[in-house]
Amino acid sequence: MNERALIYIRVKPQGTCKARLAARQDLEEALRRACAEQGREVNGVFVDESFGNTLTRPGLGALRRRVAQGQANVVVCPELEQWTTRAGDFLRLLDDLGRQGVQFSIPGAGPAFDKVIQAGRAAIAAFEEYLRAERQRKKSRSVSE
């Protein structure tokens, strides 16, 4: 199966416009090459210029809408810090992707990153299991009263 990929790049708005454009082009080229090597078809590239630790970014928002429309099954990013630097935001994004059946990939990240992904998914699953159990306890109490 040929994977459909969306690429996300965040470039910090520092330096000259020419330097930012060159950095973006270099990252995009490297990610396109990595996708091609893994048999992934690139269906879009989304770019934000920001420093902030917010998930309210135009490029990220557009990418998330495309994911929700089923236009990809993998999101590729050059490094985790470009995606987010906050654990809670990372879990939220990972959960959003997972609910859509979409994987998150950082080419060349290796086994340490795989452990981060597994831990994130385990945390989400544990949280959801806790909520289900809590709801069941409440339901049981209301029936017995």
Image (cartoon, grey):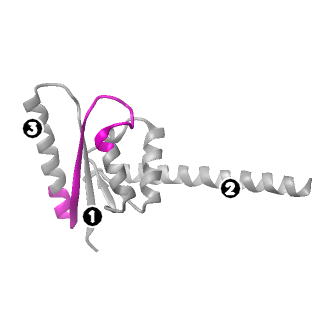
Measuring from the top left, give residue 97's x and y in whole percent. Answer: 41, 55
Residue 16 located within the stretch drawn in magenta:
no
Q: Quadrant of residue 133?
A: bottom right
Q: Quadrant of the N terminus?
A: bottom left
Tell me the kind of residue under disc 2: Arg
Tell me the kind of residue under disc 1: Arg
Compute the Cα span from label 2 to label 3: 49 Å
Residue stretch in magenta:
33-60
Q: Quadrant of residue 86?
A: top left
**Mark 2 crowd level (few <14, some 14–19, many ≥20, 10 Å Cα):** few
Measuring from the top left, give residue 89's x and y in whole percent. Answer: 44, 40
Q: In which quarter of the image is residue 13?
A: top left
Residue 39 located within the stretch drawn in magenta:
yes
Horizontal side of residue 81 vs 122, given as left or right: left
Which residue sits at x=54%, y=49%?
A: 123
Element at label 1: strand
Of pointers 2 and 3, the one earlier in the residue sequence: 3
Tell me the kind of residue under disc 3: Ala
Horizontal side of residue 127 vs 111, given as left or right: right
Do the CB atoms of the residues marked 2 and 1 lie less than 8 Å apart?
no
Compute the Cα span from label 2 to label 1: 33 Å
Which residue sits at x=48%, y=49%?
A: 120
Which residue sits at x=19%, y=52%?
A: 31
Of pointers 3 and 1, the one earlier in the residue sequence: 1
Return the residue at label 1: 4
Element at label 3: helix
Q: Nearer the viewer, residue 81 or 20?
A: 20
Compute the Cα span from label 3 to label 1: 25 Å
Residue 52, labelled with which disc? none
Return the residue at label 3: 22
**Mark 3 crowd level (few <14, some 14–19, many ≥20, 10 Å Cα):** few
